[in-house]
Image (cartoon, rainbow, N blue to C red):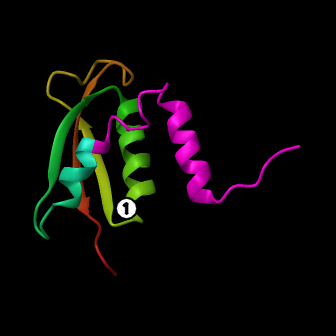
Amino acid sequence: MGDKLSKDEAMAELSQLRSGGRGGTSMFAPMLDDINDLGEDEVFTDTVDGYGRVSGLRRYIENNTQGEFEVKSAKTPGQEDVDQSDAEYKVFVFRADEE
């Protein structure tokens, strides 16, 4: 039979298991620290390899900031003809517009 956990406990365990035993720290955690320190009119930007990393960053930000930020991306110059899984992307993280 299975066990019942709180959502927080389950997410912590899942993070630990996915990290391969590296202490449960996401590769995106340092970015999140910088993103959380953004001023109202500031934007965080960085480059990542492959659209999978863009998607991973987007999910990580959504899961850890309760919709406070949005992530946009574009291939860097010269990467237009490179497959999306191999291309380098520039990511931009903005504070989400409040409605």
Asked whether 58 or 17 is in front, the reply is 17
- From the image, tell me which residue sits under label 1: 65
Is residue 97 rendered magenta in the image? no
Asked whether 44 or 83 is in front, the reply is 44
Q: Quadrant of the C terminus?
A: bottom left
Q: Position of residue 12 (x, y in %)?
A: 53, 47
Asked whether 80 or 64 is in front, the reply is 64
Vertical placement of 18 versus 11: above or below?
above
Left or right: 94, with 66 as reference point: left
Residue at 34% in and 18% down: 86
Left or right: 27, with 59 as reference point: left
What is the total number of numbered labels drawn onto the structure image?
A: 1
Is residue 23 rendered magenta in the image? yes
Residue at 78% in and 49% down: 3
Asked whether 69 or 30 is in front, the reply is 30
Q: Quadrant of the N terminus?
A: top right
Q: Position of residue 69 (x, y in %)?
A: 31, 61
Classify mark 1: helix, strand or loop.
Answer: helix
Q: Magenta span covers which residues?
A: 1-29
Q: Amino acid at mark 1?
A: Thr
Vertical placement of 42 versus 29: above or below?
below
Vertical placement of 19 versus 38: above or below?
above
Residue at 18% in and 51% down: 34
Q: What is the quadrant of residue 79 in the picture?
A: top left
Q: Position of residue 66 (x, y in %)?
A: 42, 65
Disc 1 crowd rating (10 Å Cα; few below 14, some 14-19, many 20+) is few
Q: Residue furthest bottom?
A: 99
Left or right: 31, with 59 as reference point: left
Q: Position of residue 60 (x, y in %)?
A: 41, 47
